[in-house]
Amino acid sequence: MKIIRILMLITLGFLLIGCSENKPPVDDIETPIETPIPTEPIPTEPIIEPFTVDVLDATSLTMISSDDFVDLALSEVLIEETVVSQKTLVGYRLMLWFKDEDVQPQGWTIQGLNDVMHVSKDLNTVYVIVGEKTDDEVALYTHEEIYMARIVDKKMVSLIQKPVSVQKRVMNPDEAIYYIQYSAVTGRYDYHTSLRAMQGIINRESPRLLTLSNGNPYYKKSDQTWLDILESDGYDLIELTSLEEVIFTFKDSFEGIITFKDRFKSYNNWVSGESDFALMMASVTNYAPLPYGIQHTISTLTSLPVIDSFEVNGRVVSGNISDYLDSQNVLSAYDCYALVFDQFKEAFNTNSYMSLTSEVMDYAASEQMMFFDLKATQSERDNFLSKRINAYFDQKNTYFQVYGWVDHESSALDFISSYGGIIDVVGSGNLSLISRLDASVSTFTQKTEDDAIYNANKKYVTFFASESDTIKVGMAFQHGAWLDPNRGQVKINWGLISDMSVEFPYAYEYFINSATEKDYFYSGGGSAIGFVDIDSQMHYASREAIADANKYYMEIADQQYIDMYNDKYTSTDLFEKSVIGSYLFRSQVDGAFARIHDGNTSIRVETWNTIPVYNRWTNYYPRRASSGDVGYTSLYELSANHYIQNQVSDYWFIQSTLSNTQEMITFDLFRQSNGDGYQVTFEDGVISLKKTISGVETTLASKVYSTTSRQIKLSIDKSTPLDLYTRIKLYVNDLLIFEYFDEDNTFVQGGFGLRSDEPTKNVITNLDGTDSSMAKQIYNRIITDPNHYILAYYGFVGSEDYTLAQYRSEPGIGGVISLSPTDFYKIQLLLDLNYSGVYEVVNAREFMTFAQNYMQTYGTLR
């Protein structure tokens, strides 16, 4: 069968060939060209997908889309790119999409691909940014480039690059944290006390109320920054606008109303003894203390009764505190404090009390502490009462804590420590709230990376931000320094008391989470729980108990080093290495830093009871020095009305007193040989900043400021690689008049001159200054220090904007130096530029480890 099939196929093939050959040719017919079938779609105009974001929990919309843009009002938003440039963004307020909501949003949660933005206040600061505007022309982004941002005071504070969803939020009044501007309350001490007392009572059970003050003495924006952090962590926030709203919202926290007056002023004529007495009574009774005169209105509003009388510690007290104090023959603030202690002390906290810090009264109320505004080292009467108070707490405790401050740091610390007391420097409000906020963990781990490699030929440098014994420095964000944009560029040791990890865990966790690998935390002031003078004047049981507390808190906080305080201020003060060594050994620290008071000021590492101790004798709160180049003796007199300094420098700081004259006074800055440069002039109550190029004068800025007394601080700076623009800054009477950056950098160095219509020495007096910035001064100390291990700075670290930090103005000659992380970075850049490979900035842990190795090998740190 297989053979037959093959034969049939062969035959069929021949037949087909034959047919093909007999077919006539067709020459005049075109062969059609076949169009290939496309394998891809035929190209057309590209389809642009709209920008869309899902909307959750809204009733009027489910999506935000670029298709909506045509119906919305476009906004222009100015932001600062650098100190000399601005940019105009264009976009739409997010609120525009929610105009038809029955219940308007009180916030949003904006989710991006990798990040999230929580918004619970200032909703009109959130925008959908769609482009930029330049010279009246708008350049729109592609849909992929559109983002959402929050813009406040010309700064982009947060953004979501690729938003995915917007969830509408309505605040839960039963769980929200409420906040009130301090300025919304009458500016008297009695109203201050009333608000602080109620805040402490409200927050005692749970964190519910924050007060916003624009005048925190240690960092002006502290309260606002904590509010921003709460918002970013997703807390519901609701604003209140009056004292009446506060008590109405939280009326269930109070049992009734007591009244008082703003009487019996204390030392600063602000604190009132009667107000403080009322706060203390309120804290142990849960009554709302109100300034006399508003009680009946508040009672009607809240249905809280006005209390006729109440009992504390077995004694009947009138609900009208004024009447009660009169019945007790109280005539002064001192009498108020003595009365509380003598008759009511058993009703209050027996582990701690508060002293001299009225801005922290909310914490005193929440913890039911007694409060005393006494000056124990300046008043014999106050001293007698203070001795009784501290003896009482000494009897009740192995050690006790004094929250607040004292009238004289050194002698008062020695006095309190001898009773077993520790000073917890607070100085910031809202502790009653922050102390009640939980952290997400119970123990912490520092991010610090020890990446330096020991080299015996190198010189090692370390920087200490002091105030390491205080709660206030954490609450005040290291005087604003923590928010410096250059933090993380250089290794810094930050004082942050270890017991914050337990007493204020939310705050401590914030620092741990926001730290970089170059930030290291240590405790100081003699302990991990506060400011204390450790010596044999304190009972050994107190020293041991404090050491045990050190071990406990430092383990939780992941800290290893303590800075020991002792300045031997008084002749009776003791400095005993054996006592401190035993204390440190029991604390189980890895090391300590101290000023060793034994007559030997050399920089060295000693070992006390196995614990290495570095002698940080130099650079302790250094003061700003005069360079000798600014006074009249160093200037060249062209005439009685004109003096010049021909020395060329890239920095000048000049301070002086100007006489009461309307005549022209001129300071020439970065003066060139032909007279060009910058000028600051004072004339007829107007201060002007000018620039002269080839004899042509241009006014850069001016301000009306007229006063009979004029203390000026004037600086010009282009001294480090980080100073991108010549900066000119002027303070008059510690008020910042202007800070100007010349984007053209027309002049980057020069001399200076003084000119006036009247004889210059008569109108410009008390002349002093320097040709080195504070950062440069520390840099110069480093490069002239013969030691290999240089604790280059131990002192105040704060915001580069002096107006926001504790001093509120740039320190003058003789003032305590204030540096910022930006300044430390400048120092590091100068070291790298001029001494590459010679110096290395390290953290305290690396510093101590390397110093021990070097000391063991060479017997010295030189």
Image (cartoon, helix red, strand yellow):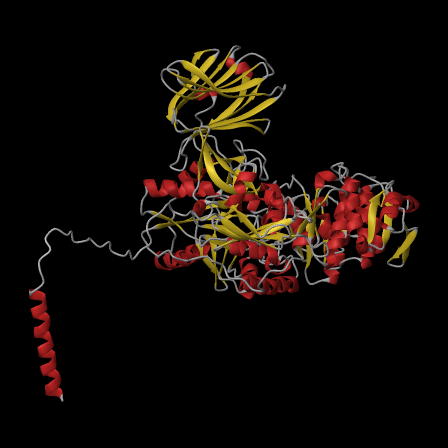
Instruction: State the image coordinates of residue 535 (x, y, percent, origin top left).
Output: 60, 57
* Closest to the observer, 56 or 43: 43
Q: Is residue 412 left or right of residue 524?
A: right
* Closest to the observer, 601 or 654: 654
In the image, farthest residue toward the bottom: 1
Residue 797 visible at all? no
Instruction: State the image coordinates of residue 309 (x, y, percent, origin top left).
Output: 92, 52
Q: Residue at x 9, y 73 (%)?
A: 15
Q: Residue at x 46, y 13 (%)?
A: 642
Instruction: State the image coordinates of residue 80 (x, y, percent, origin top left).
Output: 49, 35
Task: Tell me if residue 520 comes above or below residue 183 in the rendering.
Answer: below
* Residue 417 occupies quadrant: bottom right
Residue 58 visible at all? yes
Q: How many marks?
A: 0
Instruction: State the image coordinates of residue 528 (x, y, percent, origin top left).
Output: 58, 58
Q: Is residue 87 left or right of residue 398?
A: left
* Residue 706 occupies quadrant: top right
* Closest to the observer, 566 or 236: 236
Quarter of the image containing the N terminus?
bottom left
